[in-house]
Each structure stands twice: as structure tokens, then as C-alpha cells.
Amino acid sequence: MMNLPVRMARWSAGHPWRAIAGWFLFVALCLGIGLAVGGRSASTEDFRIGEAGRAEAIAAEGGLEQRPVERVLVSAGPGAGRLDPAAADRAARDVAERMKRLPEVLAVSGPVRASGGTAVRVDVTLRGAELDGKKHVGPLRAQTAEVQAAHPGLRVEETGSPSISKGVEKLRGEDLSRTEAIALPVTLVTLLVVFGSVVLALVPVLLAISSIVASIGLSMLASHLFPDNGIGANIILLIGMAVGVDYTLFYLKREREERARSAGRLGSRAVVELAAATSGRAVVVSGIAVAVSSATLYLADDVIFSSIATAAIVVTLVAVISSLTVLPALLAVLGERSERRRARRGKAGRTRRTGPGPVTAALLRGTARRPGLTLAAGVLAMIALAAPLLGLNLTDMGRETHPRAIPAMQTYDRLTAAFPELKSMHQVVVRAEPGREDAAAGALRELAVRAKADPRVAGAAEPRVSRDGRISLLELAVPHHVGDDAALSSLRDLRREHLPATLGRLDGVETAVTGDVARHADYPEHQKRKLPLIIGALLLATFGMTVWAFRSVVLGLVGMALNLLSAAASLGLLVLVFQGHWAEGPLDFTSTGSIGSRVPLLLLVILFGLSMDYQVFVISRIREAALRGVPTRQAVLDGIGGSAGVVTSAAFVMVTVFASFVPLHIMEMKQMGFALAAAVLLDAFVIRVVILPSLMLLLGEANWWPSRGVRRARETAPEAPAMEKVG
């Protein structure tokens, strides 16, 4: 494995045009095969979680599954006074007649009047599964628009889960287009500053884009094993730009350093091989680490995280392949052209500074003098940032958190104001063994009576029963949004008191509760139960990868501790910003007083993976020097100093990509972008430049335990020269 990057680089540099053509053929084949086969989208069944998911499975068994429902609201037009009942009835009948003629429609209700006479609504049930509604809602909305045109004195509008999902999807697409427009130019400018060459600045971006294209095709194939919940392409774009540019940047910077160090004595192919032996190996280790870390998301037993894991693994491995195959070929071609230009001009290659910049040098001088004090200061600062994590409040970011820039959400607010009972609901699902149907039906009626007496419930609908009579479903209207205390407490009482007192007394009867409130409550609880397992797997993966890469148990333990510290600090900062209200104006959001339940888990996994990028690259530099016989103290300072520039550049690119998600409208994506940007900043500028060197200086020779490689290097090369001194 360790010699693989060198062998691949040697072949690629020796046959550059074959390697370049082969890479672009690979990209075309991946995309072509993916488009030909097509992807598999996650179905309703894939999203079932906890008791709510169990209830939905029982209901589906009896043909009582949730269907996509759209609601057309008829109210007084803007600027009008009270609603004209006769005009509203005519518009409602017009809506119903038009909807009944559509093949997408399964059923249409009669007009339902609001209690205050302010509005009339028509409920339209679509055919197909609940998640498929957004695919078929277009014709319904077109008919609603025609009714509005025919009744200009009224406000006729449509909302529902399909319309809202379609609106969220559209807004997310528009937002992501804007992030691309921001991140790409900033990345190019950063790389231009780093390399001082337009051609070299374009190489990382072009390879990252080609890796993303290939990964999209491969992810379509992978979706037949791990269904895509709709955000796979977004994750590929997010992770692909970050790691694609990073890996190419690591390789390019090392090639430039080796070229400058050789001062023209080595040819381009030899320089590329040297870079492959160092940074090429680091890229392989880092890529495997990101993939292994991402794979822990499969332990969440959740289609959303499975989709994210698949996308992250695919794009990371493709980025590694690009850096090992086509990148050496490009560097060889560009290097040979550069040599020919210099030969024609009679100029020797310039020697470039490879040491740290003035800020890093100053920090390292302080660290070298007082490593214990520097370590304590850095750790205390990170702990202070992590402190708000103690108040973490996780919730499922549902419909109520969607931005009101979506027209369907504005209609939803008007709908629930006129019909509060539509804010949310409980669904009690009952499955009775043969011969127990009558007893179950009686207990269900008793439950409905008890529920009607609860002020937090707005009434019960007539139970629906499967054809064989064994499965029943009772819907209870809840006039509160899913995150309200009243809604959540009514769910707790329903599960803990009302059900045990009625259906729970019967043998041969199985019950479960689902609905809007149950889904909202069960999902975060599911994530909390899975979090310790995934954190344990992440720590084990970090430890194992570090020990494998550096043959050091001590560095494995250091890697685990620093990753935990970095993750805790970034999560604490996320809580500080988004659970409070003080940052609402600058970041353009309305605080929900909570963090999206998916964000911490996603942050942990991605951060642990990306942290390995910096850790492997930095420690590789330190170990290289130590294996040449340089004393560990100087090796630490030289390794940190020599890698500081590329780590800073890579971090800036990553932060740009992640921070471009902060202006997005979707709350979870905004939180995720902020958290990842903060995490990368802390990891690159506090962990790798302050805490890691301080700790390694204090540990000294113990850093390499139990490996004897460094000790043998001391014995065989006691007089080996050190790298240039810091500062």
C-alpha cells in the first residue's frame, strides 16, 4: 500500500497522455453508466424510524398508509373585507370539479368552512406514496392558478406536504447555485495566490470538478444498494470540492517544494515520484480515513445518513484516485514545459521558501519556549468554546422551520390560522389478532372519548379499518405545531396513559402511535441513542488509522483526544450562535432555540474525517524529519513550520466552501455550513498550530511509542542535518 502511490505516479508521469486520456474516459464512463442505469430514490418505507415508523409499517400492511394531501384555501382577497360565503362556495366547487378530473387525484373532499367563517378549504388526496406527491403536484397547482384567475375577488391558493417539499427543493437548488458562484471564484483566487500561476491554480479545481462528475455517476449505481434521499448530489459537491482541492493542493505543494529543493538537478518525473512518496502516501491515508469515518454513518440506521455516507465515500475515493493517476501526469507535462521554457531563456529554477510564515513562526517560537503553558492555554480556550454544548437542544427541523420565502409556507400559515386543527395530528394504529377485532374496536372508541376530553386535542376522526378488520387507524387532530410543548406533552400522555388504560389492557392487540408529532419526537431520540455508538466507532477508526499510518499508539491516542476537542468546541460554538438570538441579524435566521438533530452527527463524522487530512499531512512531515535522524523537538518544529502554509491554504479553501452554506435559507444546511467552517478553522489554526506541537514537544520521544523506526534512524544517522530552523 505504501509503495502504491510511487508506482502509480511513476507510470503516470512516464505515460502522461495515456493517464490523462484514461482519467477523462473514466469520468465519462462513470457518468454515462450512472445516467443509463439511473438512481434509486429512497421510498417512504426507508424513512421509518422508531415507534412512529413501526406504526406506519402496520398501517401500510392494512392499506391505511399516509397519502400525499394538498389543501386548497379560499379566503378573502387582499384588501377585501369579510369573505363572501357564496363566492367562496362557487370557487370551492370549481376547485373540486377540476381536481376530480385529474389522473393524479385519488379523492376530493367537500368544502370545509373555518369556524369563524374566514375561509373555506378543499382537501385533495393524491395517488401514490406519500413521498411521491411532490412529483405529481404540478397539475394540481396549475388548476388552482386557473381557479384564482377565474375568481379574482378571492384569494385561492394551495399548500400541503407535496407543495412544501417542491418549494424547499426549488429553494435549495437556487441557494446551492449561489454557493457555487461564491465558492468557486474564491477557491481560484486562493490557489492563484498560493501558486502564482493560473495553470497550477486551475489544476486542483478542474480535478475536483471532474471527480465530482464521476462521483455523481457512481453514486447513481450505489443508490441501488443505499437509496438516495435527495441530498446525495449536494454532499458530493460539498465534500468533493473540499477534499478534491485539498488532496491536489497537498500533492502540488510538495512537488513544488521538491522541484525548488533540487534546483534543476532532477527531472520532472523524478520530482513527481518524490512528491508521490511523501504527499501521495499522505493523500491515500487521508482518503481512506475520510472514507472509514464516513462509513460510521451507516450505524445510524437511517436512510438520510446512509445516503450521506455513500456520497462522501464515493467522492473521497474518486478524489484520491484522481490525485494518484491523472495528477502526476499533469505535473510531469507542466514540469517538462516549464523546464523547456527555462532552458530557452537560460534561467535556473528559483529557490522558494518552504518554511513557515511570520505569524506561524512567531507562534512556534512561543510554543518552543513554553510548550506546557501554550498547551494549557489552547486546551482551556477550546474547552471554553465547548461549554455551551451542555445546553444542547436537539429537534427535528420540520415544516415549521422552513423559510417563509417559500410561497407554500405562506399559504400554510394562513391555512393553520383559519384551521388550527390542521397544525399536526396523532395517528393511533392498532393491529388485532384474529378474534380480537371487536374488543380492539371497543377499546379504540374508548380511547377516542378520552382524547376528546383532552384540551390539547381538537377532536377525533372516524377510525379507518382495513378490509380484513384487523388493523385500525384513529386520527386525533392537534391544534399545536409539532414542536410546541402542548403537542409533545399530549403525545407523551397518549403513549404512557391513554393507550395503556384502554388498548393496553387487551391481549393479542398491538398498538403504536405515529403522526406529525410522533415523527418529530422520535427522530431526535433515535439519533441520541445512536450517537454513542457512532462516536465510539469514530474514535476507534481515528485511533486505528493513526496507528496504522505512523506505527504509534501514542499518536493514535493524541489523534482521538484532539478530534474530540475540536468537535466539542465547534459544536459549542454552534449552540452559542444558533440556540440564542444575538446572531439572528448578522446571519439572517430566526432562532428555533434548537439545533437540527442531524447536524451534530454529521459534523462529527465529516470533521473526524477531514481532521485526518491535516493530521496525516502534518505528522507525516514530522515523522519524515525524525526518520532522517532529526531530533524529535526540531522535527516537530520543522514539520509544523514546513506544512503550515499548505494547511492554511487548504483550510481557507474548505472554510470558503463550507461558509458558503451559511447564507442558505434551509436551517439545517445553514447550521451545518457554519459548524463545519468553524470546525475547520479551529482544527487548522488552533489544534494543528498550537495544541498539537505543544503536546508533541512535551511528549518528546514518547510520540513514537512503540515503534522503533525513529530510534533506529537516530542510531544510523546521528549527524543528519535538520530542516531549516523556525523563524
Image (cartoon, grey):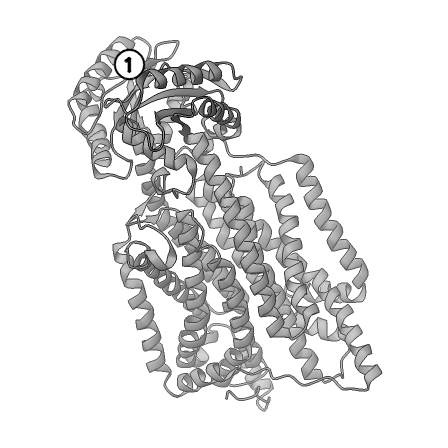
Residue 292 position (above or below residue 170): below
Q: Nearer the viewer, residue 585 or 531?
A: 585
Residue 475 image offset from top left, x and y in percent = 29, 21
| Kind of residue indicated by mark 1 | Glu
Extreme residue toward the bottom, this view: 719
Which is nearer the eye, 215 or 409? Answer: 409
Looking at the image, which residue sits at the far right? 344
The one of 665 and 296 positioned closer to us in this rendering: 665
- State left or right for residue 700 relative to residue 445: right
Say which residue appears at 37% left-offset and 37% top-offset.
410
Nearer the observer, 11 or 229:
229
Quickly name the residue at label 1: 462
Q: In percent of the image, x 68 and y 73: which residue is there?
A: 197
Q: Secondary structure at mark 1?
A: loop
What percent of the width, then of the height, locates residue 300? Answer: 42, 44
Which residue is pictured at 16% across the width and 27% down the height?
Answer: 455
Q: How many numbered discs?
A: 1
Question: Height in image: 18 above or below 139?
Answer: below
Q: Is residue 441 above or below residue 531?
A: above
Q: Is residue 521 left or right of residue 669?
A: left
Q: Looking at the rendering, in which quadrant would you find the N terminus?
A: bottom right
Q: Residue at x 50, y 78 (%)?
A: 640
The answer to whether residue 197 is visible is yes
Question: Picture coordinates of residue 253 (x, y %)?
Answer: 63, 73
Q: Label 1 crowding class (10 Å Cα cut-off): few <14, some 14-19, many 20+?
A: few
Q: Position of residue 444 (x, y in %)?
A: 24, 16
Q: Quadrant of residue 349?
A: bottom right
Q: Is residue 243 left or right of residue 562?
A: right
